[in-house]
Image: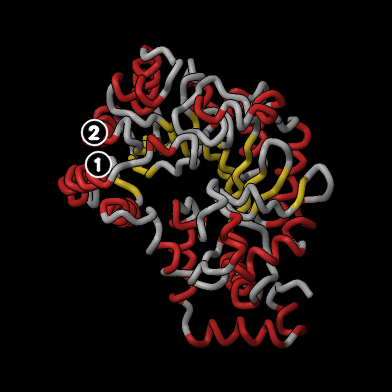
């Protein structure tokens, strides 16, 4: 009998630092290039142009051969999903559709996080069979779109919504479509329209997030306590209906907790990130456009290695990745390590300002709690007794 990948991940967590299978999801940043400058983007926000000048001049991009070789390696390691997103717009990559097709050809789930402004023909999405499309819109109206997308023609909002509605009309079972909205001081009043728009366009889901701002640059756009209170009120009628009909309101518990924290003057995830361990070191990785591998979405200051220097498998089993796992295993993120997470060097724990791996951590924690006593005892015995571990699929 061999343990399934989900059990092997739990075995890695119980071990404390090793991994016995690959990450479930790998986010791949195809490129840092983007055709927009969203107001609180960590790379392209107008307020960050000077501090990000060197990176913006280079605009790192992964070559298609590098990406396809990475997919082969990840498939062999047991990875299930490639999440195309990044510091830039993935569809700004000159071979983006070839990369997406390459993931699908290898039997990997292809999920696309995009501003959707470069999709001029939904047939390509449908013909390829992309599994998930998340449209990062940040607005329910043209006015809010203009406020959060400085320099972008407001007519782009109409083009995006029209194209997305067409995709939803023409699709059969996939892609699963989701509108994604980052809440800032400039668009918080638009929250009711954001929720309604997902319904109007026929999307499967909608999700709200809170802007993780960069101190000294985009922090004037941070959501204010009074705005957080107002958005909470707007969520009330959706909380009930989204439980039984589309579009589903995803991450409802998380956005409620975040808004309540901000309304009380606390960091958005001050409570959530200390309520459970972080499993990202076993379930997730992000490959940046310059080839660096980071162990969680916001760990760009503590990369585990680069795929231009070593194989992904070597990085995944390396000491820097193990250091992240050791630190993240504690529910309380009090270790100095977590000062290096996120965009604020002054924050004692960068995770508190917004954890994008939170939902996967919750699902993995549920899986760990669901283990029966015999199942957990078997995994723990396999970790102690190498012959038993090898018989169950644990590498030596």
Name the spot of residue 133 as percent of width and height, x first. Answer: 46, 35
Q: Looking at the rendered structure, which numbered label has been put on residue 227?
A: 1
Name the spot of residue 62 as percent of width and height, x first. Answer: 72, 33
Q: Looking at the rendered structure, which numbered label has been put on residue 308?
A: none
Numbered disc 2: secondary structure? helix
Q: Residue at x 46, y 33 (%)?
A: 40
Quadrant in the picture for residue 154: top left
Q: Nearer the viewer, residue 283 or 211?
A: 211
Question: Quick check: marks 1 and 2 in contact, CB under 8 Å?
Answer: yes
Q: Relative to 329, does residue 146 appear above or below in the rendering?
A: above
Q: Which residue is mark 2?
A: 189
Name the spot of residue 1 as percent of width and height, x first. Answer: 65, 76
Q: Relative to 201, does residue 297 appear above or below in the rendering?
A: below
Between discs 1 and 2, the one toward the N terminus: 2
Q: Nearer the viewer, residue 2 or 307?
A: 307
3D distance between C-alphas at marks 1 and 2: 7 Å
Q: Is residue 15 left or right of residue 137?
A: right
Q: Is residue 24 visible?
A: no
């Amino acid at each position: 009998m061999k343990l399934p990948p989900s059990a092997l991940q739990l075995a890695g967590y119980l071990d404390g630092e090793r991994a016995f299978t690959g990450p479930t999801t790998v986010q791949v940043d195809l490129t840092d290039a983007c055709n927009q400058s969203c107001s609180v983007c960590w790379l392209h926000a107008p307020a960050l142009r000077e501090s990000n000048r060197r990176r913006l001049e280079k605009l790192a991009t992964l070559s298609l051969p590098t990406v396809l070789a990475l997919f082969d390696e990840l498939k062999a390691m047991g990875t299930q999903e490639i999440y195309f997103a990044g510091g830039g717009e993935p569809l700004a990559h000159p071979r983006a559709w070839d990369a997406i097709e390459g993931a699908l050809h290898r039997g990997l789930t292809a999920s696309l996080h995009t501003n959707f402004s470069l999709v001029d023909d939904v047939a390509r999405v449908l013909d390829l069979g992309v599994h998930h499309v998340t449209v990062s819109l940040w607005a329910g109206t043209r006015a809010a779109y203009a406020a959060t997308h400085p320099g972008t023609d407001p007519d782009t909002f109409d083009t995006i919504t029209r194209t997305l509605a067409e995709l939803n009309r023409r699709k059969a079972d996939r892609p699963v479509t989701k509108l994604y909205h980052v809440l800032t001081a400039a668009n918080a009043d638009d929250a009711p329209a954001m929720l309604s728009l997902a319904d109007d366009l026929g999307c499967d889901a909608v999700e709200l997030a809170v802007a993780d701002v960069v101190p000294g640059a985009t922090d004037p756009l941070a959501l204010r306590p009074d705005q957080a209170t107002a958005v909470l009120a707007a969520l009330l009628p959706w909380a009930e209906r989204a439980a039984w009909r589309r579009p589903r309101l995803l991450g409802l518990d998380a956005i409620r907790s975040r808004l309540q924290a901000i309304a009380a003057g606390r960091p958005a995830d001050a409570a959530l990130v200390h309520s459970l361990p972080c499993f990202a070191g076993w379930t997730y990785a992000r490959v940046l456009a310059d080839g660096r591998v980071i162990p969680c979405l916001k760990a760009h200051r503590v990369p585990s290695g680069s795929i231009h220097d070593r194989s992904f498998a070597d990085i995944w089993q390396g000491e820097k990745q193990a250091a992240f796992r050791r630190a993240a295993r504690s529910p309380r993120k009090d270790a100095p390590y977590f000062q290096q997470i996120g965009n604020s060097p002054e924050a004692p724990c960068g995770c508190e300002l917004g954890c994008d791996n939170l939902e996967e951590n919750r699902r993995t924690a549920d899986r760990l709690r669901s283990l029966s006593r015999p199942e957990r005892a078997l995994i723990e015995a396999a970790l102690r007794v190498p012959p038993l571990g090898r018989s169950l699929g644990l590498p030596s």
